[in-house]
Image: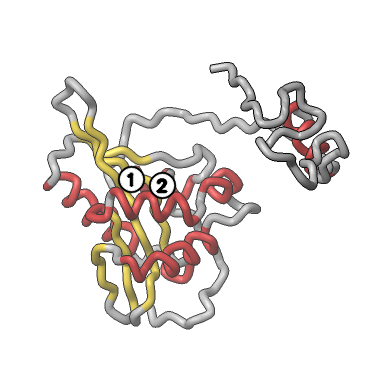
Amino acid sequence: MDDMPSGSRRNPRQLRTNAPITIREMELEDLAAVFALGERIFTADRWPNLYRTWDEFELIQIFGTDTETCLVAECNDQVVGFALGTLIEKRRSAWTYGYLLWLGVEPDLSRSGVGKRLVNRLTELFIARGARIMLADTESDNLPAVNFFRRQGFTNETEHVYLAKNLTQHPEYVRRRRSLAHPPSSDPSPSDAAPAHLPPGGISPGDDASPGQPHEHDD
């Protein structure tokens, strides 16, 4: 899900838009800053579907498997944008696809060209790795993102439908909630309690086997 959503929330650290911006490969130390920037951009009120799917586990997974196609934009030693991509190779096919999974830019730098530079650099990396087609997706009503991708040469648009299902009324959900609210007692019943002392042979007086005679086990 690639997006260039607009926003007006100002970064706590003031940015100088005339400062040089560097596009570089993402590093391990950038994970926290990239996740925090995504949290500011993909908010529940503006982009609920992106908010639901943007989490630190997905970020770590993408970075761990596709480090070379994860980029950040840096300004004044601060991460102000990111592009996370992956390569898709189909079996028994000569086609390799470059997939732009996530794209985000600090709202204060909207229309500064940062997003375009990230996409251009990622495009070069995809081509160097044999990709013949580059994919991107966004919500159809996210017009800023749709227009952005059109300007970058993306075509062949296809409508995508997002669906959601409320699971709180599902019988399994209700059962689990009830079991968590009323957990079974862990105290053993008198019949389950182990005897305080066993006679020689390890047989309790209530067992059928005679003292000193081993139990028979069903194999």
What is the secondary structure assignment of the residue under circle 1? strand
Residue 163: x and y in percent read 60, 30
**Type of the residue with mark 1:** Leu
Judged left or right of residue 219, residue 167 is right
Residue visible at 38% across and 64% down in the picture: 81
**As drawn, which residue projects farthest toward the top?**
218
**As drawn, which residue projects farthest toward the right?**
190
Q: Which mark is residue 100?
A: 1
What is the secondary structure assignment of the residue under circle 2? loop
Residue visible at 83% across and 45% down in the picture: 187
Q: How is the image coloured?
A: secondary structure
Residue visible at 51% across and 53% down in the picture: 55
Q: Is residue 174 visible?
A: no
Residue 98: x and y in percent read 25, 40
Q: Nearer the N terminus, badge 2 or badge 1?
A: 2
**Type of the residue with mark 2:** Asp
- Observer-nearest residue: 66 or 164? 66
Question: Alpha carbon of mark 2 to alpha carbon of mark 1: how far?
Answer: 6 Å
Image marks 2 and 1: residues in contact by CB distance under 8 Å: yes
In the rendered image, the quadrant that contains the N terminus is top left
Q: Which mark is residue 2?
A: 2
- From this view, report whether residue 207 is shown above or below residue 68: above
How busy is the neighbourhood of tag 2: few (under 14 within 10 Å), some, or many (20 plus)?
many
- From this view, report whether residue 186 is shown above or below residue 104: above
Residue 6: x and y in percent read 50, 58
Quarter of the figure with residue 215: top right
Q: How many numbered circles does the render carry?
A: 2
